[in-house]
């Protein structure tokens, strides 16, 4: 049975887990802590891919190992019981004689799911599951989708005016939002495995799609250019960050593809679908390359394409306190909605302000 303070300690474990954002993929975010006589005696989190797991860090932080035999271990994700980059955490827990383990959620990874819990229970460890389960699942939504659906978690990011416009009637969009919101976009890029744009957006902004206004890694840059119209000199093809271009296959594009490959750009051909590229094939190829999270930074047509294909999981919309009027460019291209009951429905998260702009996050209902 959960103790009354289990949620308190699990929330602290969640806070620890998020300290690894942007550095652990394709591994999950995990936080752990040890409690003895109501006092936290050790904390840890997964710092980077290939590094020690959170449980290992928390145990190593305990000065008096005798305390471990009367402690409770709190961990946001089921401890592993298989040999991966590091030894199994379950073995370490049993070796140290920790009598009770509280788990936020089970690991969807087939080699672990439920087996870590079973191993601990078989050895006499008291296991409590499902404490703050929804929150623990949410922080690892990309990892979970990857191992259950076999596709990356897709977030559509857009910036619009209060009246739902992403550009004026002349196509001008710089800048709808302020500097604080734009800095946050760079931070969000650093937390995703890949950022994705269409040819029109890459051309209009000659976008770098790199992380410049904060510290953090550059994501994989993904550009959808069905007819390979972008010039090889485009900034998105520079050497600042890895780039993959998706296009529709044709003989006349092979020479340009080879030219881009000589520049270090990956080129991958996929089928055409609904007047564009087959987005599912794009996501399948990205997943094959180890991409678990994608932030779509394209415009109204690309966002609508992902929504119509039911391949988007989340929206992040920065709303500026401005009005462009009815002649501005709408945030979304047509979605084929004719009746209110056909609407795509969302679940809002609490809003955040960045300067004068507001960020609305919402998960898309399937």
Image (cartoon, grey):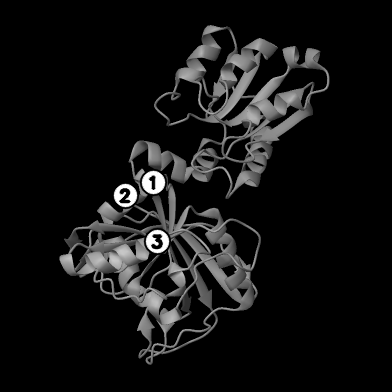
Question: Do callouts 3 and 1 mark residues in contact (Cβ within 8 Å)?
Answer: no
Q: Quadrant of residue 249?
A: bottom left
**Quick one: SS at disc 3?**
loop
The Cα–Cα distance between marks 3 and 1, rounded to whole angstroms, is 14 Å
Instruction: Specify whether 205 is left or right of 18.
Output: left
Q: Compared to 179, does 104 lie above or below?
A: above
Q: In this rendered view, identify the residue nearer to me: 64 or 227.
A: 227
Q: Quadrant of residue 256?
A: bottom left
Q: Position of residue 263 (x, y in %)?
A: 41, 64
Which residue lies at the image location 52% right of the left edge and 35% below the top edge? 133
Which residue lies at the image location 64% right of the left edge and 68% below the top edge? 213
**Quick one: SS at disc 1?**
loop
Location of the N terminus (image quadrant) = top right
Q: Residue furthest top?
A: 123
Q: Position of residue 341 (x, y in %)?
A: 25, 62
**Quick one: SS at disc 2?**
helix
Tell me the tag on residue 265.
3
- What residue does disc 1 label? 289
- What residue does disc 2 label? 285
């Amino acid at each position: 049975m959960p103790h009354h303070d289990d949620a308190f300690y699990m929330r602290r474990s969640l806070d620890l887990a998020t300290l690894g954002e942007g550095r652990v993929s394709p591994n999950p975010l995990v936080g752990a802590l040890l409690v003895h006589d109501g006092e936290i005696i050790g904390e840890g989190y997964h710092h980077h891919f290939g590094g020690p797991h959170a449980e290992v860090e928390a145990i190593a932080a305990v000065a008096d190992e005798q305390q471990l035999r009367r402690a409770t271990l709190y961990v946001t994700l089921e401890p592993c019981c298989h040999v991966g980059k590091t030894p199994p955490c379950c073995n370490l827990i049993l070796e140290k004689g920790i009598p009770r383990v509280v788990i936020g959620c089970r690991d969807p990874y087939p080699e672990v799911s439920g087996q870590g819990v079973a191993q601990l229970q078989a050895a006499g460890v008291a296991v409590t599951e499902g404490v703050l389960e929804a929150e623990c699942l949410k922080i690892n939504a990309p990892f979970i989708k990857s191992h259950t659906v076999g596709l990356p978690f897709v977030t559509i990011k857009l910036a619009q005016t209060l009246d739902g416009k992403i550009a004026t009637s002349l196509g001008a969009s710089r800048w709808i939002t302020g500097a604080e919101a734009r800095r946050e976009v760079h931070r969000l890029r650093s937390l995703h495995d890949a950022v994705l744009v269409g040819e029109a957006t890459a051309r209009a902004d000659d976008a770098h799609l790199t992380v410049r206004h904060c510290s953090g890694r550059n994501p994989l840059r993904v550009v959808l250019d069905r007819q390979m119209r972008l010039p090889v000199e485009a900034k998105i093809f520079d050497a600042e960050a890895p780039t993959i271009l998706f296009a529709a296959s044709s003989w006349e594009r092979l020479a340009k593809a080879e030219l881009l490959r000589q520049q270090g750009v990956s080129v991958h051909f996929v089928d055409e679908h609904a007047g564009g590229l087959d987005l599912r094939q794009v996501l399948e190829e990205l997943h094959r390359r180890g991409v678990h999270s994608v932030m779509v930074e394209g415009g109204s047509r690309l966002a609508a394409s992902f929504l119509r294909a039911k391949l988007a999981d989340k929206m992040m919309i920065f709303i500026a306190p401005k009005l462009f009027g009815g002649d501005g460019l709408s945030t979304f291209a047509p979605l084929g909605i004719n009746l209110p009951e056909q609407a795509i429905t969302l679940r809002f998260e609490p809003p955040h302000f960045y300067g004068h702009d507001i960020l609305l996050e919402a998960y898309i209902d399937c």
